Image: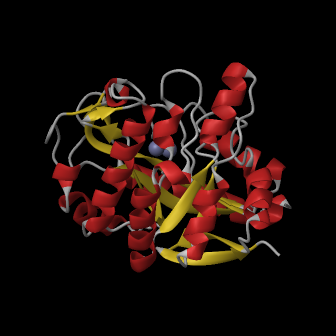
Amino acid sequence: MEASKLFDNHNHTRHFSPDGEQTLDELLQDAQSRGLKGLALTEHFDKDVRSGEPFPAVSEYGQPAAPGEWVFDLQAYHGCLMQAQEKLEREGSRLKLTKGIEVGYLPYQQPTVWRYLAGFNFDAVIASIHCVDNKDIYFFQDAYRDGARAAYDKYLDLIIQMLEEPCDFDIVGHFDYVTRYAPGAYQRMNYQDHSERLDRMFRLMIQSGKSLEINTRTRYRLLDKTGTDIDLQDPAIIRRYLELGGELISLSSDSHEDHNNGRFLAETADWLYSLGVRWLCHFEARKAVMDPLD
Ligand SMILES: [Zn+2]
Ligand SMILES: [Zn+2]
């Protein structure tokens, strides 16, 4: 797939995300040298979370972050993005840069967190589950104590819960994030093992116009760490989403480091095309913009 058809919906930098390593300049250079159509900056907003655990109300909305809290200054973020957008325009670049955010869902913060964020004019809001049983699975392995399959079920249950609440977001972030940190060899999430939950998730997403993110970070992390290139996600998951009437799919590299922006997007788009996907989408001013693959 030509890169010029592809939009990377999920990226972090070191300026605003505690785990971001790349600068915004490096990120934009990557996207330009890859020839992408555009990208969204989507820094982490994990209110109350420090070192992978929530401490309820550790800071007030709109007040400075508590030490180590995974939130950032939204006004400064806006200014930084405006500057970068103006620079791209001045340089005559065709690359589109949008203002997004990745919100870590925690049940007790509903619906306050969405009311607060509504005042900041984002293009795209990703909602992601990072914490299972109140612990970020990047830091803690507790969620896997009953095996990978039980952890995957729990993770999908949290996405379903998030979709059943009046949460104001556009994209369901990395539905298979839970596979990334499972102990032992990589275990793919298969449709047949989780069919009821995936069906429920897809139906809720379709009803409320939420987009399905296909996130390539698990694939390149594993490749860089072990030299093994895993299969793409289970094609049965995509086929079922399409069968139920799903039309919104957003591709993401979830880049945090230099050179990962746009990584595996073209291959993944080819794979989706082979399964019958003809449009991807990104968001501008909270509206889905369809990007044709043909
Ligand atoms: Zn995430
Ligand atoms: Zn992310």
- 71 and 279: which is toward the camera: 279
On the question of residue 49 being in view, the answer is yes
Q: Is residue 31 left or right of residue 257?
A: right
Q: How many marks?
A: 0
What colour scheme was applied to this rendering of the protein?
Answer: secondary structure
Viewport quadrant of the C terminus: bottom right
At 46% from the left and 73% from the top, the residue drawn is 286
Position of residue 144 measured from the top left corner of the image (x, y, whole percent): 37, 28
Q: Is residue 258 left or right of residue 111?
A: right
- 228 and 78: which is toward the camera: 228
Position of residue 3 measured from the top left corner of the image (x, y, whole percent): 81, 59
Q: Please say if 28 is above or below 228.
A: below
At 30% from the left and 59% from the top, the residue drawn is 162
The quarter of the picture where residue 250 lies is bottom right
At 69% from the left and 46% from the top, the residue drawn is 232
Q: Is residue 103 left or right of residue 59?
A: right
On the question of residue 94 being in view, the answer is no
Position of residue 252 measured from the top left corner of the image (x, y, whole percent): 62, 52
Q: Please say if 239 is above or below 192.
A: below
Viewport quadrant of the N terminus: bottom right
Position of residue 118 measured from the top left corner of the image (x, y, whole percent): 31, 68
At 48% from the left and 48% from the top, the residue drawn is 193
- 80 and 268: which is toward the camera: 268
Residue most toward the right?
Answer: 2
